[in-house]
Amino acid sequence: MNILESFKMAISSILSNKMRSFLTMLGIIIGISSVITIVSLGNGGKNYIADQFAKMGSNTVTLSVDSSKVEQTSDYFTLDDVKQIKNRVDTAKYISPNVSEKGTARTDTKTNTANITGVNADYSLISNVEIVYGRFLNDREVEEGKSVAVIDQTSAKALFGTDDVVGKSFKLGPTASSKSATVIGVSKASSMFGGGGGGRSRSGDSTPALVTVPVTFLQTLYPIDFNISTLSITSTSQANTIQTGDDALKIVQTKHDNKTLDLYKAANSASMLESINQVLGIFTTFLSAVAAISLLVGGIGVMNIMLVSVTERTKEIGIRKAIGATTNAILFQFLTESVILSLIGGLIGMAIGLISAQIIGSFASIVPSVSILVVLEVILFSSAVGIFFGIYPAKKAAKLNPIDALRYE
Amino acid sequence: MIEVKDIFKRYVTGDIDFTALKSVSLKVKKGEFTAIMGPSGSGKSTFMNILGCLDKMDGGTYFLNGKDVSNLYDNQLALIRNKEIGFVFQAFNLLPRISVLENVELPMLYAGISAKERRIRALSALDKVGLTDRVKHRPNEISGGQKQRVAIARAMVNNPAVIMADEPTGNLDTKSSIEIMKIFQKLNTEGSTILMVTHEDDIAKCAKRIVRFLDGDIVDDYPVKERTII
């Protein structure tokens, strides 16, 4: 008897007992679909984060102050630090302070909370700010602390009702002592760090407006609790990113005379991406392990039903043996059945997994990504489940003495 | 054709040790039509199952078609059952989920015969038992007599050396029983060796030779006088 014959026989046997076959497959379907959903969403999330980092530039270094170790205000970065680093570290191409404060943005008609970020002119090159209308801050404005601002498209719409708002004025700053600022540019609302497009759409008006101003202007808005805790630096090339970070770190450490405490840290985007991916990887692995357990349970389900099937079909086995089926033919028949069951279950599970990954992904703004490798693994794994859990019942069936099997009622 | 010597078989179930066959010896020549008779528990069915290689004996020798089949492995026995023996059961033992035609094709499937030839030979076997109009039916859609005819077609389809039937008419009415015996007589006339267990005298009279069992031994062996020819 050849493979095609036993394949046909297995299919007809599966079809003749549709309900039982479906219940058998259910465990496999659930297991495989959850593995596929989790893995493809996990990979999609990784891709999304990698994308965001690529936008930010992979040769970016962030210098930060560990606020829990700060003892005095002078421990924070100063604008002079920025100058020093720019002058003394040759590989530092762009450098900008990065200070964020919360406040309000108010037009004649609208008041909104605001995330106000103080930077310098280099910032647009570090963070790849895309300007839609007008322009970004220039050096003179930063030097003189001009009351100008760049706001993102969505905030512009929320505040002014339109996005082309260059030249318009609004009040900005702490609620009690806001100052007037003139819009000189409107940026595209897309970047995770500059705008967070996904988060914005959910809660409409209540999301803070994103406003970027000269760091010096921000200082006049918040004279008391103004502290520079972050410096963003772009190195001349990706190769010397780490070196640039270390050099800048040495300068601030010497300047602030604070070598011993690890108050300052340099993080580059590559290492940040790596650690985020690592966390995400652990998370995905953990969830996959949980899903794999359901796959195991599914496999045991297959074994269960095959055992029932063997008992139920003892007479059939007896008849087949009586007319000349060898032990191997019976073994092969039952094994084929369980492999086909698992395989069909695996394919259905894969389809369901892909669809649910798409659905969940569309809610979480993640594009799920499935590699052909994962698909192959799933197919291999579900056949393996079929073989592994099918062997015992198949052996049991094949070993039966023909007359005993025939007498079975 | 069949030569068994000192066949011994016993069943041990817990404390009960039951000797089903004490020391049975029998020779059957090619072309014979033998009926094995005896009361229930006399060991005739056990004997038949051993001859049909469905059960194993605990002692003795068995030559089938000149070949010693006393101590064969399971797979070798499967081959003997497939090629040398055609077995007909009292309970028909057809597979319920496949058609009549597929049932008849099944022994050839295990013999590795091509699909095309299987179909031709199965149809010709069904023609011999007069069932060409029922080939697509499932076994539960036909009568008992028809089922047994399908079983006979299945038994002879691989051209076995001997056809063995264990109470082939036991589940049938008189009319169907006569039909079945007619087919057996026809097959015997055409050269088939037939061995049949029965407890009915009328049925046994259709055979050429009667072997009587009692308490696990052959007690009588004689040719049939006044044979019923259907």
Image (cartoon, coloured by chain):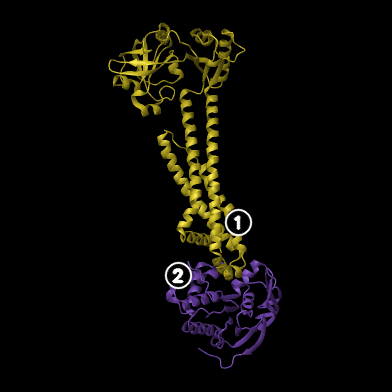
Chain colours: A yellow, B purple
Q: Is residue A301 visible?
A: yes
Q: Quadrant of residue A104?
A: top left
Relative to B124, residue A121 above or below: above
Label placed on residue B84? none
Relative to A315, residue B228 above or below: below
Residue tagged 2:
B138
Query: Where's residue A375, x and y in %?
Result: 50, 44
Relative to B23, residue B224 above or below: below
Q: Amino acid at mark 2?
A: Arg
Circles 1, 2 touching at the beta carbon (< 8 Å):
no
Badge 2 marks a residue whose secondary structure is: loop
> Dot 2 falls on which chain?
B
Q: Tell me what residue is drawn at x 64 percent, y 70 percent.
A: B77
Q: Which class describes the residues within 10 Å of circle 2: few (<14), some (14-19), or many (20+)?
A: some
Q: Which class describes the residues within 10 Å of circle 1: few (<14), some (14-19), or many (20+)?
A: some
Q: Is residue B111 visible?
A: no
Please state if A218 lies on the left or on the right of A75 as rendered: left
Q: Tell me what residue is drawn at x 51 percent, y 51 percent.
A: A343
The residue closer to the viewer here, A305 or A381, is: A305
Badge 1 marks a residue whose secondary structure is: helix
Query: Where's residue A163, x and y in %?
Result: 31, 21
Q: Tell me what residue is drawn at x 55 percent, y 34 percent.
A: A282
Label placed on residue A392? 1
Q: Quadrant of residue B131?
A: bottom left
Query: Where's residue A181, x and y in %?
Result: 34, 11
Query: Where's residue A370, x and y in %?
Result: 48, 40
Q: Residue furthest front?
A: B15
Relative to A396, residue A380 above or below: above
What is the total number of numbered labels drawn onto the structure image?
Answer: 2
Between the C-alphas of marks 1 and 2, the distance is 31 Å
Q: Residue furthest bottom?
A: B226
